[in-house]
Image (cartoon, rainbow, N blue to C red):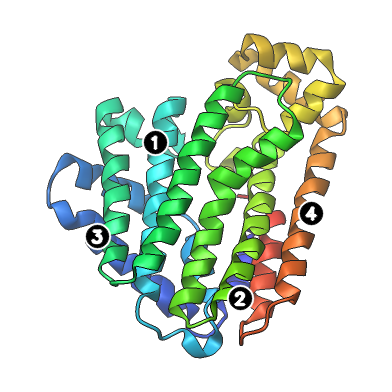
Amino acid sequence: MTAGAVAEVLHVPGLSAYVDAVESALEESVGWAGESAVAGAGSETLRSGGKRLRPMLVYLSAPVGGRGGDGLVAAGCAVELVHMATLVHDDQLDAAPLRRGRPTVWAAHGAATARATGDYLFARAFADLCATGDMRAVAILSEACLALARGEILQRAQAGDPATTPEQYLERCRLKTGHLFAAAAMLGGRFGGLPDPDIGRLGAFATALGLAFQIADDILDCDGRPDTTGKPLGTDLLDGTVTLPLILGARRDPAVAGVISRGAARKDVLSTLARVARSGAVRDARAEAERHADEALAHLAALDGGLDSEALAAVVRGAVDRNA
């Protein structure tokens, strides 16, 4: 999200205080194991920052009159811990040296510590949510985590394959990103007192939001600014992750397809990304992100239940209008 979009959302009454409460809960949860290696590595991951978009989505998905409900802070903490865990595991699988401009757990401490740290963060997420006593909430988050695992398997199967279709890519994004966004929104609705039918509609809204967000994120890897994204251009190309701009570019330019197939070297990155841009793939991927944003807004328009629709719409706009 752009700084302006974040500022607009944080202007929502109570949200800034809620984010601070989640941050405190995260520090307490991650430091639960004392001075152990995994707690230390988890604390490093926490200190690396992040927009805390998923906890914000928890809060904003609660009806305005239900934002003091028990469990909202625990839910925000749990979804962020799951997100942090996936980043640690992803960085290990991708052998990524940097995350948000800082050394990853894998780079700083090695593969064994990265695996254990990710597992620790997943466990803490469920411990925190179980403490609410709401087993349906636990089931919502566990279903999102199962989807994450399935999405990771898909990503590995699609790696280095320029013949991956946009539909296959979108299914992967739905599993890896959309379901956790949906869980965040559904938990906010549940702990805020929304009826079940509206909670389901919130899930559909947030799934579309997650797809728009992920496509926009993948576009940044092709034409973003490393000083704001915190990672060099072409990270996906180098590790073989086929994203929508790369898929569309490979369909239109055999040279792009060839680089993806054989595996890109550092010297290939800028020239290949230039070819992707010239093919119109970045433009068309951006249009696809906008399409999913429009879908999210359509789901939002069908919701009532005392929700702050204006704030949720600002999140949608910020998801596609991004520089980091």
Q: Earlier in the sequence, mark 4 or mark 2?
A: 2
Q: Which x, y percent locates residue 85?
A: 37, 45
Q: Earlier in the sequence, mark 1 or mark 4?
A: 1
Quadrant for residue 91, please give it.
top left
Question: As displayed, is residue 157 above or below residue 10?
Answer: above
Q: In percent of the image, x 75 and y 54: which residue is there?
A: 292
Give the residue pinned by disc 1.
Answer: 89
Q: Earlier in the sequence, mark 3 or mark 2?
A: 3
Give the residue pinned by disc 4.
Answer: 290
Q: Secondary structure at mark 4?
A: helix
Q: What type is the residue that disc 4 sits on?
A: Glu
Q: Which mark is residue 52?
A: none
Q: Secondary structure at mark 2?
A: helix
Residue extending furthest toward the top:
262
Give the residue pinned by disc 3.
Answer: 29
Question: As displayed, is residue 73 above or below residue 226?
Answer: below
Give the residue pinned by disc 2.
Answer: 198
Q: Which x, y percent locates residue 283?
A: 84, 41
Q: What type is the residue that disc 3 sits on?
A: Ser
Q: What type is the residue that disc 2 sits on?
A: Asp
Question: As displayed, is residue 293 above or below residue 87?
Answer: below
Asked if residue 39 lies left or right of residue 119, the reply is left
Question: As displayed, is residue 40 above or below residue 109?
Answer: below
Q: What type is the residue that disc 1 sits on?
A: His
* Distance from Cα at disc 1 to Cα at disc 3: 19 Å
Q: In percent of the image, x 42 and y 43: which residue is there?
A: 86
